[in-house]
Image: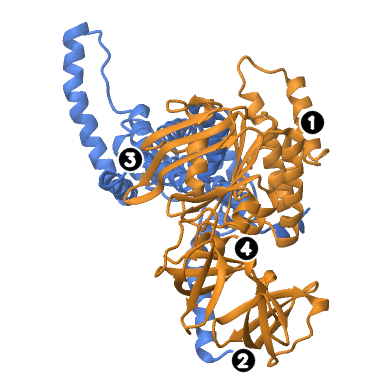
Amino acid sequence: MMQPTVAIDVEFRNVAKSFGAVVAVDNVNFQIPKGSFFTFLGPSGCGKTSCLRLIGGFEQPDSGEILIASESVAQVPAYERHVNMVFQHYALFPHMHVAGNVGYGLRQRRPRMSAREISKHVADSLALVRLSGYDGRRSWELSGGQQQRVALARALVNKPTVLLLDEPLAALDRKLRKDMQVELKNLQREVGITFVFVTHDQEEALSMSDRIAVMRDGKIVQEGSPTDLYSQPLDRYVAGFIGQSNFIVGTVVEAGDQVTIKTERSVLFRAPKSKVAKSLLAGDNAVVAIRPERISLGNKHEAGVESFAGRVAQVTFLGDQTEFHVETEQAGRLLVRMSSGHASFVSGDPVIAYWKREAGLALLNE
Amino acid sequence: MPNKATIFLQYYAGLIYIFLYFPIALVVLFSFNSGNYSAEIQGFSLRWYGETWRDPFVLEALGNSIFIAVTSATLSTVIGTLAALALQNVHGWLRNLYDGLIYIAIIIPGIVIGIATLIFFVQFFGWLNPMLQAQFGPSAPRLNLGLPTIIAAHTLFTMSIVIVIVRARIAGMDRSLIEASNDLYATPMNTFWQVTLPQLFPAIIAGFLLALTFSFDDFIVAFFVAGPNTTLPIYVFSSIRRGVTPKINAIATVTLIVSLAFLFTVQYLLTRSSERGPGNSGTVSSDNQASRV
């Protein structure tokens, strides 16, 4: 639970929104602490963008309450909300040059801001996104990354309470996306504004966010810090969506702190139960999630670890790491990721895949 | 190697173009004829352009035509643009009905519009004039066919063209630009002036120029509702009955050049605005745009 000393910038209370028969946001509750980098993560159509548009005021909730800086915004139109958005395709005004775009929000202020003050703020804002000197350019003369930064400057110049970012990196190529991830995070620390970010890219979410809300079918499945979500996923969906996981399906034979599971091939092995998910009972269908980097390959069975014998089916060299697909008799195909220096197996080699018991996580298989 | 069918089609296409443009080329050619008759070329001269320019009847007709074209194009641009914007907020079957009616208005033959508007004006004035007389006595103005009725009729049929052009532009406009403006504290009214209108501007100008051209060139509708007034096409038509003089050729050539100039401007505005249109600004891939910097 939130500590009472932390101010909340955005809060949803039982918010629901449907478009015709499609439920986009299904009774959602969350709080976004001031100054944090908060991410909605989920596949397309999970309701993450709808949440963002509800905060921005582009959609109105069917029911429930939205609070921005602790005040209800039920009757407040988008143009009166002190919230700014970076649109997915930037939505730069093509009939204005860069400075005109960035100064747009300031020019709407009443009483009017002097032209000198506006151009000073615009210059500061462009300097913040490292685009000084681009004032006179047109948006179509800029690269995707530059357009992106103009859109950021145009939003940040207004010093909003909350900055909304709707998959702003999706249109950039991979290298640029990586650079912008770092840049966005630094920028957020620098300006101290609450960022609400929407993405379907789990890597992006993990690397930038303070908190992540994983969404599915209009609901928040799990919310927490990136490390929480990675180490203690609530269910199979989150475990599969945040990072990669191997899933070994079976039935619970004996429940406790450690759960004993019988696989479909009637092999017994043990894994710790989840600290956050529903507890397992004997007879339940269970799934054990194991991260590929927590599994090692060896030549013989060792004591004190869970291990399955198998054969290397495929080897993928990734540079610093190497991925092995291991076909095991008892647990199906396992994905194993090891440092390249430690692994010299080739396709067809018989191997033992093993992991420390704590590396597994037993979850209910729904 | 091109086969016989291909060669035949190439000649066929060429013949079609000759068929289309040969008469027009003749008109232009004969307008530079120095002789008195259109039938034979006697030498190159700008004589008939000069004579046309000095003819008070031509100038009067030209003045009327320009006045009618500018006024009706302005009216139809304002009304048509507002209608196109309003239609954005109409949905469902009513919208389909309106859309259909606009296209029907475009394809209705000029002669039908001419007759319909003539009957309307005659009926309307026949009803209005006695009322005015009764109200203000014998000194009351008597409304009759004239320039205003031509302007009204022209506005009627050029308006739908403006609506169609502006509608297409609105449909192609990036909705997120409006949202971005909203997001950046602009009230709906300010958004309209600062984003929507500038985005529609090329289409509005294009619609205006097309309306101008259509009105300027129109003979049929104007002929019905002109009353005692002449426009340039009406003047040309009535003088042709006395034989085609090189003067007519000169008038036709000037009209042709002005109309073509407008049409090329329209084409330029519409293609340029769609190339640099709002929809393209963000969606072009980053590598593609980077190479342009």
* Residue depicted at x 33% and y 36%: B153
According to the image, label 4 marks what residue? A243
Between A170 and A62, the one nearer to me in the picture: A62
Of the residues tagged 2 and 4, which is closer to the observer? 4
* Residue depicted at x 30% and y 35%: B225
Cα–Cα span, label 1 and label 2: 65 Å
Please give the label number shown on residue B90. Answer: 3
Q: Specify the amino acid type for callout 3.
A: Val
Does label 2 or label 3 sit earlier along the sequence? 2
Between B186 and A307, the one nearer to me in the picture: A307
* Residue depicted at x 83% and y 77%: A341
**One can see residue B201 in this view:** no
According to the image, label 2 marks what residue? B1
Please give the label number shown on residue A124. Answer: 1
Of the residues tagged 3 and 1, which is closer to the observer? 1
Could you tell me which secondary element the residue under label 4 belongs to? loop
Residue at mark 3 shares a chain with residue at mark 1: no
Cα–Cα span, label 3 and label 1: 44 Å
Q: Position of residue A161 (x, y in %)?
A: 62, 29
